[in-house]
Image (cartoon, helix red, strand yellow):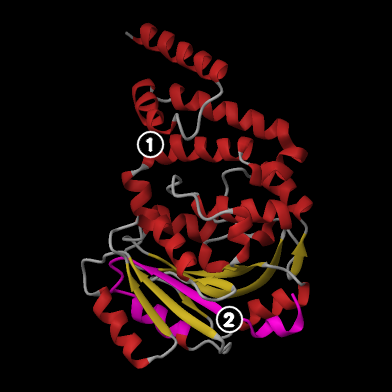
Amino acid sequence: MSNNQKDSLVTICIPVYNGSAYISDSLSSALKQTYTNCEILIVDDCSTDNTLEIIQQFEKLNSNIRVHKNDRNLGLVGNWNKCIELARGNWIKFIFQDDTMENSCVEEMVTAAQKYNHEFIVCERSFLIQSDASSSQNEFYTNQVSRLSDFFRTDSIIHHNDFNLVLSKNLTNNFIGEPCSFLFAKSLTNKYGLFCADLSQLCDFEFAARIASNIGLVYVPRKLVQFRVHGNSTSESNHKSKKIKLELIDSYILAYRYRYIKEFRMFRMEFNERILNFYYQRVNNLFDKNWDIGHSLIRPFLIKYPLTYIHVMKAMIKGFLKNLKIG
């Protein structure tokens, strides 16, 4: 990144859906950024509350805010990708409707991008745990959440080889962070793709891992964003309503993408045996945990994510015999 790119336009993307409770806080933090060459893009995914009215009021008062309303509901990940599509900036900085940023967040991350001549920057985040958060949420975000600092030296560039070694041991553990922690060049999505909408919970981790496994990342250890944790968050609703899909399908799709898509080729060159074992375990899990559920859930994904034929036959036979024994 050349010196004059420090002043490149950054698009602060705020995807929203029924976010009236906290969207004003999120927008206010975006407007207070010390880095001034920003546009704020808000993409409303057909909210049914008064979110649209709130953000349109902000738009009237601030010339750097642009509001787009989708013609139809695209869903969580679809709306993230719509934000990227509509962004005019060379750089993308996500902030979600529940979250806030330190005033210097964008400036510090752009400065890190220039210092290390890099296109993917990840900062640390703190967690705003609300009173309506579940006990499991509280426990996870207080004591169990992983951070890059658990594995790497802070305030440094992380080479892709070093990243891949850690990834090979943490294939489903999001040790990178949420999209609100990322600043990345929009051009990276042309080379490595957008967020994978087939994933319910690990879509952010897979996206970041896909990029970092090829080019590494720059880690800024400062807690520059605040990730709000509450009872109505997407993560919590995912765990409640999609538990089986998360355990079976998300894990399988992630394993499949590690094993087969071209963007993880560099990762496979270094750790193919681990990835292959992980993939086969996930194929078996689809049928071992619950034959009927596993079979019905995987059917819609067979064409898009074809299973290795001989391994699927083994898993199917194993599941069939298991059910005969139970019966």
Q: Which residue is mark 2?
A: 9
Asked if the stretch drawn in magenta spans residue 7, the answer is yes
Q: Which residue is mark 1?
A: 244
Q: Which amino acid type corresponds to the residue marked 2 in the rendered image?
A: Leu
Residue 312 percent across, percent down from the top left: 51, 19
Q: Is residue 176 visible?
A: no
Q: Position of residue 239 (x, y in %)?
A: 38, 47
Residue drawn at x 65%, y 81% is 108
Residue 121 seen from this side: yes
- Of the two numbered discs 2 and 1 in the rendering, the one whose residue sits closer to the viewer: 2
* Marks 2,1: beta carbons within 8 A: no
The picture quadrant where one finds residue 257 is: top right
Could you say where residue 229 lies in the image, as x and y percent from the top left?
41, 64
Tell me the kind of residue under disc 1.
Answer: Ile
Please tell me whether mark 1 sits on a helix, a strand or a loop.
Answer: helix
Specify whether residue 155 is painted magenta: no
